[in-house]
Amino acid sequence: MSKREESSTDVVVEVRLNQQQEVALQRLREEGTFGSTDAEILRNVFREFLRQTRF
Amino acid sequence: MTEYGTKRVELILEPVTGKALPVYRGEVLRMVQVDGQQCVDFNAYSLYDYKEFMEASNTRGHHGFRPIKGDFLWSQHSRNRPMYAILEMPPSCVTDLARGGRCKAAIFQSMGLGLHTNCQDTFAEAIREYGLSPDDVHDSFNIWYNTEWDSAGQLYGVHNTGKKGDIVDLLALFDTLAVPITCGSGDVSASSNYGLRPIQLQIFEASPETLALAEQFERQHGRFQRTLNDLRVQTIKADRKLRPDPSYKPEFLNFPLRYRSIEVPLSQEENARLQALQALGFGQTPGEALVAGFFMWYQHNRRVVSLKGIK
């Protein structure tokens, strides 16, 4: 398990993606940088977004 | 500076006139301020398909209101091909893609000036040489046209900053019909500082260097272009009246949309920041806010190729 996946889980958020949005998810899955499952990728990209912005 | 081929065309565009000129792939169209202060309006078409033309709005979408040296002029959204690269453009050449495209006779008639020269009619007369109609004139790339706009979105022309000897060089990225004209409003407006002046035109043949640039830009952007073969309707409608096709069945792209739910675990801290994002209006649910964050990141970090120019 990567370091990205080790954080605690306190909340589960339901995300809905359409087939066009899933293309981005697929690209990132192929990259392998943000995890292998859809949930891992969404969470890790969101973390990266938070890291890059002031939110 | 890029080395061009031999000069094959040289002419003076007299005030209130224009000229439709084939400019082939790798060739450079040069426009020179003979006396300075003259606004030039510019239209362009694919030489082999006039339905592909330079589009102000698509170019604006790529480069903003004022294309400069290093930017491209693009064909319309349905094709999205870079048509010209701006190889040379001095800072004294202010360009404009924000205004309503071009001046027309009605503007001057409404001012009590009678039938005054205007860019719509000058373009129409220039392209008539190639069998095109006034309806084929399209929104102009305005060169040496200084404009401003206010906070209410009102646009207006201001002092022309073009200097004698200024040059603008456009590299053709495929075979085109270029239509530069001298703006006809300039003697009664700030567009050309209340005067009408000539512009010198030159065309330089392709050189190994300019062809290499054209190939480089084609490689850079070729994946995102559409050709005539990509269009579902390829014929040009021959009559003017519109009537529905009784056999038409809509086939919208990726319709219907299909959604899938994914459960995403977050820590308390991440969730708090997600709620802050939602509170700012990025989504009506936490899931929508997370999708917004995901795609804001994606757009900034995973664009395959920049659609900006060569700056």
Image (cartoon, grey):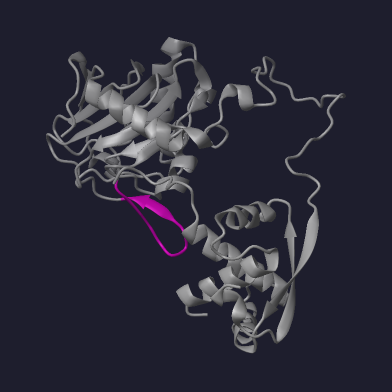
Query: Farthest front residue?
Result: A1
Residue at image position (50%, 22%) is B134
Q: Quadrant of residue B279?
A: bottom right
- Seen from the viewer's position, the closer of residues B116 and B140 is B140
Would residue B45 be counted in the magenta stretch?
Answer: no
- Seen from the viewer's position, the closer of residues A50 and B115 is A50
Residue B287 spot, x, y in % from top left: 71, 72
- Seen from the viewer's position, the closer of residues B115 and B182 is B182
Would residue B150 be counted in the magenta stretch?
Answer: yes
Image position of B232 (left or right of A27): right
| Residues in magenta, as a range | B146-157
Q: Quadrant of residue B253?
A: top right
In the image, is residue B300 above or below residue B33?
below
Residue at image position (42%, 48%) is B306
Residue A50 spot, x, y in % from top left: 52, 76
Q: Quadrant of residue B110?
A: top left
Query: Farthest right residue?
Result: B246
